[in-house]
Image (cartoon, rainbow, N blue to C red):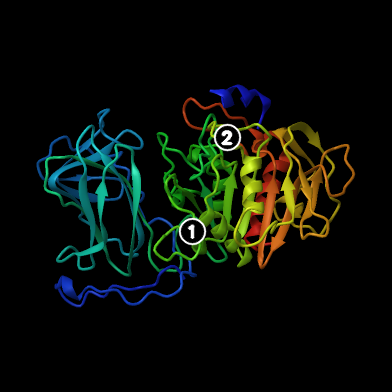
């Protein structure tokens, strides 16, 4: 990242099926799940639902037309006061034993459903549940566990619904108290239809962009989309609306160009929101790494936990793609004592799976230059892939890397005056097990210059023609699409 930022530093998924044989809720039982290796589709039509359209200002039961369809709000309204926790301008507010009920069926079923929730104002904790119906509302079954809301900050609860065919959903407040809860940004994955908009076509892969390690700290916006300071799992508006002519401003964050470009090629993209665990092989986590092809982490600003490091290394070992982006030395945006070079080095040297699994280390350096010192190889698809030839790379304050002698790492781009050896590396690739890794040691080239209100970012993505080509070619190589 640019030196001008230095001042700112100081300040098959689960395939269980629910069969509705009659109106009896006791008969709604899931089949045993299988390994989470198949991939779910992206958002159902009309979702995510952010309650930004439609008006309901009273708690009296009534129906309102939202972007996803008609909903009945019982003892609930749509609020926009300062006490309403929300992304965007509006969210629902529910009291007593109120509920939010869809009046329409999703014909593509529902896989994973997520709901953002928080306390209203200074109200005390409350509980709520997600229920689903496969018979147009004649009967409902509870999905997952009862959720307790205890924070005024929105967090996301996930439910593995896995119902094929028609399905409608209902959010029920269950504590019966006058304490009010806010609900917002409801997402629904279509279930098992083998298609879907915005990136689930033939050959499409799933990309997960980490936002769980303070990637928004300081003046950064290293996510696909940020809505009022919140990174939703599914960027909004829905990826299904992206066409060949869609601008990157369709989403709001510094990596939106990257995400939109991936969707245009038939892939799907998600954020891993703050507070969500990084796991591998945990079938109860709908965003477990086993459900994705590529994990992108742009300038993490908090250390990975022991279990997270194990998950990431095993994900690569077993065939996943990892895109690592670092920044320069002394780039600790959240002042916790760790910057991204130290955080990445800790993952590689201090994990329970394999010491130095990828065959390189990130140096505690700070360089700024534009280099044309690129590996000459017509067969390397990161440098000469389907997205074009890479001829330059510009660092606006980044680090360098050193390859371990004899390792699987392949240096791709060096500092301009350096020999093409094992030091002074600015971009490289590597393999570990059956997986792949790419590392670029500056966050500037991926920055598309757009971000949340109040943040100042820079158009590195378009600053050199090679930047988009490099990141896109590397993404497709990691996904084993080229």
**In the displayed structure, does residue 378 sit left or right of residue 23?**
right
Q: Quadrant of the C terminus?
A: bottom right
**Image location of residue 103, percent across then percent down:** 20, 55
Q: Quadrant of the N terminus?
A: top right
Residue 266 seen by the camera: no
Query: Within 10 angstroms of label 2, few (less than 14), some, or many (20 or more) residues?
Result: few
Which residue is drawn at the image coordinates 64% and 42% (left, top)? 342
Q: Earlier in the sequence, mark 2 or mark 1?
A: 1
- Out of 61 and 440, give the one closest to the viewer: 440
With respect to residue 103, does 54 lie above or below? above
With respect to residue 98, does 139 lie above or below? below
For label 1, the residue is 279
Task: Classify mark 2: helix, strand or loop.
Answer: loop
Q: Quadrant of residue 245?
A: top right
Which residue is drawn at the image coordinates 54% and 48% (left, top)? 304
**Image location of residue 65, percent across then percent down:** 23, 45
Distance, label 2 to label 1, CA atoms, is 25 Å
- Out of 8 and 48, give the one closest to the viewer: 8
Q: Quadrant of residue 154?
A: top left
**In the displayed structure, does residue 335 sit left or right of residue 443?**
left
**In the displayed structure, does residue 418 sit left or right of residue 443?**
right
- Out of 75 and 149, give the one closest to the viewer: 149
**Image location of residue 296, percent across then percent down:** 58, 50
> Which disc is residue 337 wearing?
2
């Amino acid at each position: 990242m640019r030196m001008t930022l230095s001042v700112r530093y100081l300040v098959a998924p689960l395939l269980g099926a629910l069969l509705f044989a009659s109106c009896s809720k006791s008969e709604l039982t899931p089949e045993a799940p299988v390994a989470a290796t198949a991939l779910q589709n992206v958002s159902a039509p009309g979702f995510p639902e952010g309650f930004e359209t439609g008006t309901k200002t009273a708690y009296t039961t009534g129906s309102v037309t939202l972007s996803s369809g008609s909903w009945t709000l019982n003892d609930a309204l749509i609020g926009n006061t300062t006490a309403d926790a929300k992304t965007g301008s509006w969210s629902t507010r529910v009291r007593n034993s109120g509920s939010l009920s869809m009046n329409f069926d999703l014909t593509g079923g529902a896989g994973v459903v997520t709901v953002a929730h928080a306390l209203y104002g200074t109200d005390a904790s409350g509980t709520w549940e997600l229920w689903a119906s496969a018979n147009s509302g004649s009967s409902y079954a509870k999905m997952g566990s009862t959720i307790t809301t205890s924070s005024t900050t929105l967090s996301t609860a996930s439910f593995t619904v896995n119902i094929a065919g028609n399905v409608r959903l209902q959010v029920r407040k269950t504590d019966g108290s006058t304490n009010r809860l806010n609900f917002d940004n409801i997402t629904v994955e279509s279930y098992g239809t083998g298609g879907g908009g915005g990136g689930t076509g033939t050959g499409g892969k799933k990309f997960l962009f980490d936002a769980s390690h303070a990637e928004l700290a300081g003046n950064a916006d290293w996510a696909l989309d940020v809505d009022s300071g919140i990174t939703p799992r599914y960027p909004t508006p829905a990826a299904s609306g992206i066409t060949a002519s869609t601008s990157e401003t369709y989403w709001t964050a510094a990596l939106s160009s990257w995400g939109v470009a991936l969707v245009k090629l038939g892939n799907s993209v998600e954020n891993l929101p703050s507070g969500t665990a990084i796991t591998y092989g945990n079938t109860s986590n709908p965003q477990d790494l086993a459900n994705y092809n590529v994990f992108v982490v742009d300038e993490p600003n908090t250390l990975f936990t022991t279990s997270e490091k194990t998950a990431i290394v095993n994900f690569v070992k077993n065939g996943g793609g990892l895109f690592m982006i670092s920044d320069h030395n002394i780039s600790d945006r959240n002042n916790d004592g760790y910057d991204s070079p130290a955080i990445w080095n800790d993952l590689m040297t201090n994990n329970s799976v394999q010491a130095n699994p990828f065959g390189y280390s990130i140096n505690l350096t700070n360089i700024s230059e534009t280099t044309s010192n690129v590996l000459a190889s017509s067969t390397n698809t990161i440098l000469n892939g389907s997205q074009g030839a890479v001829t330059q790379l510009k660092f606006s304050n980044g680090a360098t890397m050193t390859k371990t002698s004899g390792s699987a790492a392949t240096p791709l781009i060096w500092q301009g005056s350096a020999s093409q050896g094992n030091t002074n590396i600015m971009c490289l690739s590597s393999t570990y097990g059956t997986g792949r890794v790419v590392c670029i040691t500056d966050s500037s080239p991926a920055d598309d210059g757009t971000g949340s209100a109040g943040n100042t970012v820079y158009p590195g993505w378009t600053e050199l023609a090679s930047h988009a080509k490099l990141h896109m070619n590397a993404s497709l190589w990691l996904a084993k699409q080229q």
